[in-house]
Image: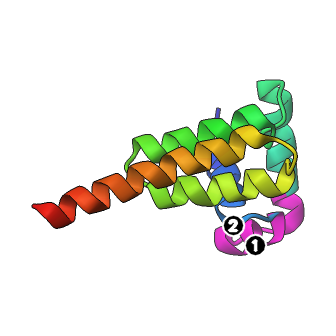
Amino acid sequence: MDTRYLQTLVAVVDTGSFSKAARVLHLTQSAVSQRIKFLEEALDMDPFSKFALITFADAYLRCSMAEKSLDILERAISYYPDDDGFVMLKMVINGAINRVSSNACLN
């Protein structure tokens, strides 16, 4: 698979919209939509499903980008406001960030 499709998906997740992703990638909104549609068909799943959003949040967290992970969880909460799992996951990440910050201050 061409990495441009994955870069497009990351841009949409990062920016929160197809039109903003198009501007960042210097593409038309239609081109972004076509790439996302290709990914949906190739992966046989919605890249904005709960599973995909949690996967993105986890990937950012594993790359020591907790704040980006929290941004994605905020977006997930707005997409799925009745899902307490996202809220709980956000609380866990916030707690971990606060513990790391507290420990850094003690050293």
Q: Nearer the viewer, residue 73 or 105?
A: 105
Can residue 5 be seen in the rendering of this structure?
Answer: no
Q: In terms of secondary structure, where does tag 2 sit? A: helix
Measuring 42% from the left and 40% from the top, which residue is drawn there? 62
The reply to whether callout 1 and callout 2 are in contact (CB within 8 Å) is yes
Spot occupied by residue 4 in the image (x, y as percentages of width and height): 64, 49
How would you rate the neighbour count of disc 1 (Cα within 10 Å): few for under 14, some for 14-19, many for 20 or more? some
Residue tagged 2: 15
* Amino acid type, callout 2: Thr
Q: Name which residue lies at 62% across and 35% down.
A: 55
Circle 1: residue type = Lys
Q: Is residue 70 above or below residue 56?
A: below
Region rendered in magenta: 18-32
Q: In the image, 63: left or right of 20? A: left
- Which image quarter: residue 105? bottom left
Predominant secondary structure in magenta? Answer: helix
Give the position of the C terminus as an image quadrant.
bottom left
